Image: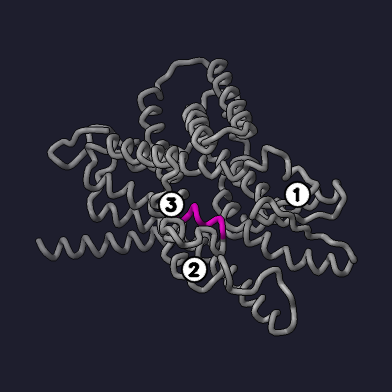
Amino acid sequence: MSARQSNTAHTTKAPSVVRRFHALDSFRGICAVFVVLFHARVLNSFSEWSFFRNGHRFVEFFFILSGFVMCYTYGSAKFNREKMKDFMIGRTFRLYPMHILMLLFFLGLELFKLYGSSKGMVFDKEPFTDQQAPGQILPNLLLIHAWIPGINSNSFNYVSWSISIEFYLYVIFGLVLMFIPTRQKLAFGIISLTALTALLLHIDIPTFEALRGLFCFFAGCFIFFIYKKTEAATLNKTLFTLLECLAIVLVVLITLVDIENKNIYISLVFAFTILVFAFEKGALSDFFKARPFLFLGQLSYSIYIIHAGILAALMPAITIAGKVLHKNLVIITENGSEKIRFVTSHNVYIDNIFTMFILGLTITISYFTYTYVEVKFIALGKKYRDKVRSSRQVRETSLV
């Protein structure tokens, strides 16, 4: 991306003020809601519409946006060992606390099942088996469960596979900036294209999930490079609005269409969408900067990481309610070798209300986890980094 001056700094200037891309923040929240609806599986509700049946595709959006934002924030920074340490401390305190909280929650559910089984209760599967087997705990603690072939990437809190990928994408990103900063464009391009080639050839090495993350995250870095080259674009608001409308239409169309290698094509559309909305110069950008959307964006990580736990916790209550009401509120169907569990009241209106209840409950709990877990640990991470820096400065001063 840039050449070094005196082997210490890049010629590309770092942003003097780190801005937030508010419209893109809103998209992060909206995409998190789409993922919740994908996992909800309420039989007669809008969550079963074709668009939401592709809600899992929006995880690619998170990866691409993350690469874009990381490159914007850190791409021009001078990375040495100390900077890398600061960077990873910040990333760890950002991702890890919520991941561990949800891992403990799922372990608690398994312990509840174990206790219930000893009292004669019957569950859909034995506690601490399959993706909740004890052997899956350590990979989850190390956040390697989506990187290592043979380990169940969907173990315990199944959505955490993307957190596993994201964490080590940060490591790779930081190492590139640390060791080959003047060749970062080349390095990011090689990584992204290699992952893309492996996806096209169906070579799942190291894993399919890892390839998705590598391709999308470093493609997001390239979207940032394009943005930097074109951020002074002088198109008027009407033209930017048309581009934004085109991006939304393409997202809807590519989400609904059934084509081979869909995850790749939808990633390219997401990349275009992120580039267009990064400018925030159209009418749709103004619309997505409304407070409700920004609120969702703020809670997006909590919404994403906790919703599987909420769905899992609701299942026993739904099962008990079905027995009390003498209704089968849980239906299991088979799609090939896959078993799909639906919740249904057998009434379209009640099913839709229940879906909205799931969303409302998830957003409400997310507000509290964001306020009392995310924010607290981000602040704690900053304090820890300041402490590390102070200790470093004391050591350097003592050596002078």
Under tag 3, what secondary structure?
loop
Say which residue label 3 marks: 207
- Spatial CA distance of label 3 from label 1 is 35 Å
Element type at marker 2?
A: helix
In the picture of the structure, the residue carrying the numbered disc 1 is 356
Query: For the residue carrying disc 3, how many other residues have a C-alpha within 10 Å: few (<14), some (14-19), or many (20+)?
Result: some
Instruction: Report the front residue among 51 and 130.
Output: 130
For the point 34% across and 36% down, which residue is it?
A: 15
Q: Position of residue 313 (x, y in %)?
A: 69, 65
Residue 177 appears at what percent x and percent y? 27, 44
160 within the magenta span: yes
Give the residue type at disc 3: Thr
- Label 1 Cα neighbours within 10 Å, binned few <14 / some 14-19 / many ≥20: some
Q: Residue at x 52, y 40 (%)?
A: 61
Going by the image, does 9 lie left or right of 210?
left
**Number of marks in picture:** 3
* Mark 3 or mark 2, whichever is nearer to me: 3
